[in-house]
Image (cartoon, helix red, strand yellow):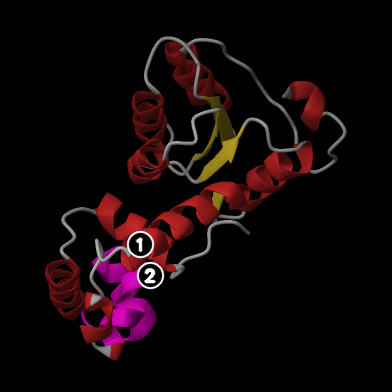
Amino acid sequence: MSLLLHGETDIEVVGEADVGWRVVRTVQVLRPDVVVVDSTTPGFSVADIIRDLKEAVAGVAVVVLTANDDEGFLIETLATGAMGFVLKWEDAPMIIQAIRTVADGQKFICPIMVSKLTDDFLARLQMGVVTEPYSTLSAREREVLPLLAEGGTNQEIAASINVSPHTVATYRKRIMLTLDLHSRAEIMRYALRRGLIDMSS
């Protein structure tokens, strides 16, 4: 990874670590903007490393580099706080794009995983496994749904659409009830599959 990034003039590699606890300690000391975590890093699960990093250094953006293309693993890492998700066999420009994207405060998911989520949703929809309650949401609720999926708080969403946080909380409850969603991870999964949010750019 260091060699890959060496020629990028806008990216500086400030440190490396090979065990989970060392990753957290190194980030606490060096305080980088972005941390690329290999999913095979020993010492902790990826979810544990992400949680520890987010607690140790507020605002650090985490990109997960992995060979695991399971949708459940993707959702788990995003729900835990990862900003980026890239498969190891993607080419170098994709990994670099992910780093730059999360450094700018945006989320990034490699297109293969976005496509996989979308294809799975469409297949389930065609088989009748998934109903279509989305059409019963109000226009305001449809506006709020992607903002929730992107991790916005009630206060942040309220400010962006000019309503009160209490109103946003009401929208959240209605959306989760209507769509039968029970957590932030499920909201994110639903929005990704419907194409309501784009984390590939």
Is residue 171 in sight in this rendering?
Answer: yes
The amino acid at mark 2 is Pro
Which secondary structure, mark 2?
helix
Q: Position of residue 9 (x, y in %)?
A: 85, 40
**Mark-to-mark CA distance, 2 and 1:** 5 Å
Q: Position of residue 112 (x, y in %)?
A: 59, 48
| Viewer-nearest residue: 94 or 128 | 128
Q: Give the range drawn in magenta.
A: 140-164
Q: In this view, does 63 lie to the left or right of 177?
A: right
Residue 156 vs 101, above or below: the answer is below
Residue 140 vs 115, above or below: the answer is below
The stretch drawn in magenta includes residue 150: yes
Tell me the number on the disc at residue 95.
Answer: none
The quadrant of the rendering that contains the C terminus is bottom right
The amino acid at mark 1 is Ala
Q: Position of residue 89 (x, y in %)?
A: 67, 32
Proximity of marks 2 and 1: CB atoms separated by less than 8 Å: yes
Residue 91 vs 28, above or below: the answer is below
Pointer 2: what residue?
A: 146
Q: Where is residue 64 in the image (x, y as percent from the top left)?
A: 52, 34
The quadrant of the rendering that contains the N terminus is top right
| Viewer-nearest residue: 141 or 33 | 141
Q: In this view, does 65 lie to the left or right of 143?
A: right
Q: Which residue is drawn at 34% across and 25% down?
A: 48
Pointer 1: what residue?
A: 149
